[in-house]
Image (spheres, grey):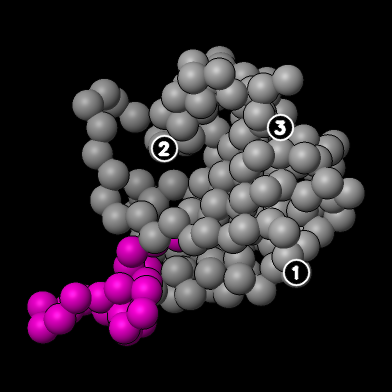
Amino acid sequence: MNPVIVIFGANGFIGRYLTRHFARNGKEVVAIARSREGWSGDGMFLEWDGKTLGPWALALEGAEAVINLAGRSVNCRYGEVNRELIKQSRVDATRVIGEAIAACKMPPKTWLNSSTATWYRHAEDKPQDDWTGEGGKGFSCEVAQAWEDAFFGANVPAETRKVALRIGMVLANEPD
């Protein structure tokens, strides 16, 4: 049996690429998203609401990796409603994935959770990194902090390695 990679937000900008890449390179992919719209068609698709436990949680049992990219698109106007959706969708998805991993009899080996490089303050005076970087201020930084608080605060088994993906701008050569 091929190693299983579970991808949340599999129909999003980055998720489509990862789903396609892993499926075409011998991995068994479970693509999880709120709808099939935008899904690459690779792997097995499961639907979820991004907030509550459901049948999708069984896919995490014994997985090689869980990759969480789920969250409201930031490609929108940053009005009050969208700001709340951007933040809460990321926190809710991360929280419930943590609950699902905690309940696994055979937990995933690795949990990679998307975050954002805007966790760091804007700095022209010195590099910002995981060891000496300084948190910033403003909406994007607040989202990053809440997102990582949910991730690192998740009480998952010690054998599940947790990695926050502090992703910056992502560009592609094809339309979203």
Q: Which amino acid lies under the numbered mark 2 shown in the image of this protein? A: Ile
Q: Which amino acid lies under the numbered mark 1 shown in the image of this protein? A: Asn
Does the residue at mark 2 contact the one at mark 1 (Cβ under 8 Å)? no
- Which image quadrant is residue 138 in? bottom left
Residue found 49% across the figure and 19% down from its top: 25
What stretch of residues is rendered in magenta?
115-140
Residue found 77% across the figure and 35% down from its top: 59
In front of the other: label 2 or label 1? 1
Dot 2 falls on a residue whose secondary structure is helix
**Where does label 2 land, which residue?**
14
Tell me, yes or no, if residue 138 can be seen here: no
Q: Is residue 138 magenta?
A: yes
Of mark 2 and mark 1, the one earlier in the sequence is 2
Q: Which mark is residue 155?
A: 1
- Which image quadrant is residue 4 in? top right
Q: Is residue 109 magenta?
A: no
Residue 9: x %, y % from top left: 55, 39
> Local crowd at mark 1 within 10 Å, few (<14), some, or many (≥20)?
few
**Where does label 3 land, which residue?**
47
Marks 3 and 2, how far apart in space? 18 Å
Residue 29: x %, y % from top left: 62, 26
Of mark 3 and mark 2, the one earlier in the sequence is 2
Dot 3 falls on a residue whose secondary structure is strand
In front of the other: label 1 or label 3? 1
